[in-house]
Image (tube, helix red, strand yellow):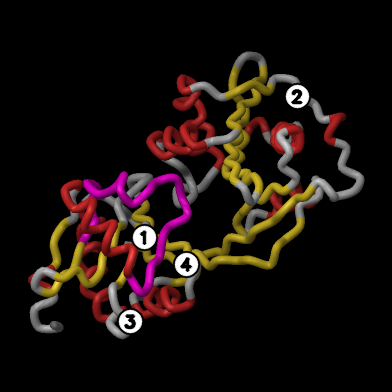
Amino acid sequence: MSDSLHNTIRKVSSGDRDLIGSFLTYAAHKHFHLDWYSVYEILDKQPFLLAAYESSPLAVLACPPDPPQVAWIRLFAVHDEGHEAQLWTALWQEAREAAIRLGASCATALSTHTWFDDLLRKANFEIANEVLFMEWTDETPDIDLHRANELGIRTMRKDDLAQVEAIDHAAFDPVWSLSLKSLEAAHSLASLATVLEVEGQIAAYQISTASALGAHLARLAVLPEQQGHGYGRALVQHVLRVHVRRGIGRVSVNTQADNLHSQRLYRSLGFRETGVRYPLFQDSF
């Protein structure tokens, strides 16, 4: 297998939908990026590569740049245990070169598995940050949601997304910023998406999701020049109150380990760390 592996790597396309679906069902090891896209939405985006031996799929790797300068590792999966390192090395070599040709300046991976940590380190990825998870429940004392200020908060519309993208890019470093396409996907999947307007202009926004397990505050951003006025706090309080009214008494959020400002905000509203942390690995080109 090792002698012919390079020659059996090919691009994945939308015509491979059933093949990829079946492969992922039985794959021994799978890494999925925690974002808004399903695997099937990026089948025609490159780099999305398949390694096969004769007609049998062995591994897949997808890292299409989004935003354009960042190639997130959105998928890596192998069919059998024992060949992870060999397959990762072969696929990553081609995927990295393709990402560079497309204009990416770095690759990143939010790893949720120790086996994937090891592969990333061997490929010269280094830990650049961590993502920590926090949780709020309606049993939290001394948080009066009924007194929250909702002035200027309204439902996000599709025609707001261009402004929302500008806020997102101003508020976050490129690695964490979302493209317009990602925001469109997030908006379509949201249980609650709101903006906060100041003098008729959007100054902040949030996007949340919900499931049987509870709600998740997936995105919160405030224009840098509008920070310090309590707009982020008002949006989070609104999120908590709306979901409590819907019978959801548990809300989670995640943030970067070095984002102390957001952690202080969430703690002040009763969020507590869950103890779950995922390392962010990065490889600069």
The residue indicated by pointer 2 is: 150
Residue at point 72%, 61% (across, down)? 273
The residue indicated by pointer 3 is: 81
Alpha carbons under labels 3 and 2: distance apart: 53 Å
- For marks 1 and 3, the one nearer the N-term is 1
Q: Nearer the viewer, residue 208 or 80?
A: 80
Alpha carbons under labels 2 and 4: distance apart: 37 Å
- The number of discs equals 4
Q: Which residues are magenta?
A: 27-49
Q: Looking at the image, do the residues carrying marks 4 and 1 touch, with CB atoms under 8 Å apart? A: no
The residue indicated by pointer 4 is: 111
Q: Secondary structure at mark 4?
A: loop
Q: Looking at the image, do the residues carrying marks 2 and 4 touch, with CB atoms under 8 Å apart? A: no
Counting other residues with Cα less than 10 Å from the Cα at mark 3, is it few (<14), some (14-19), or many (20 or more)? Answer: few
Foreground mark, 4 or 3? Answer: 3
The relative height of residue 106 versus residue 235 in the rendered view (above or below) is below
Q: Nearer the viewer, residue 241 or 118?
A: 241
Q: Quadrant of the N terminus?
A: bottom left
Q: Mark on residue 253?
A: none
Alpha carbons under labels 1 and 3: distance apart: 20 Å
Foreground mark, 1 or 3? Answer: 3
The relative height of residue 206 versus residue 203 in the rendered view (above or below) is below
Q: Secondary structure at mark 2?
A: loop
Query: How far across and how far down the image is residue 262, in percent?
Result: 69, 49
Say what amino acid the circle numbered 2 marks: Glu
Residue at the top extreme of this rendering = 200
On the rendered structure, is 128 left or right of 214? left
Say what amino acid the circle numbered 1 marks: Ile
- For marks 3 and 2, the one nearer the N-term is 3
Q: Mark on residue 73?
A: 1
Say what amino acid the circle numbered 4 marks: Ser
Query: How far across and how far down the image is residue 77, in percent?
Result: 32, 68
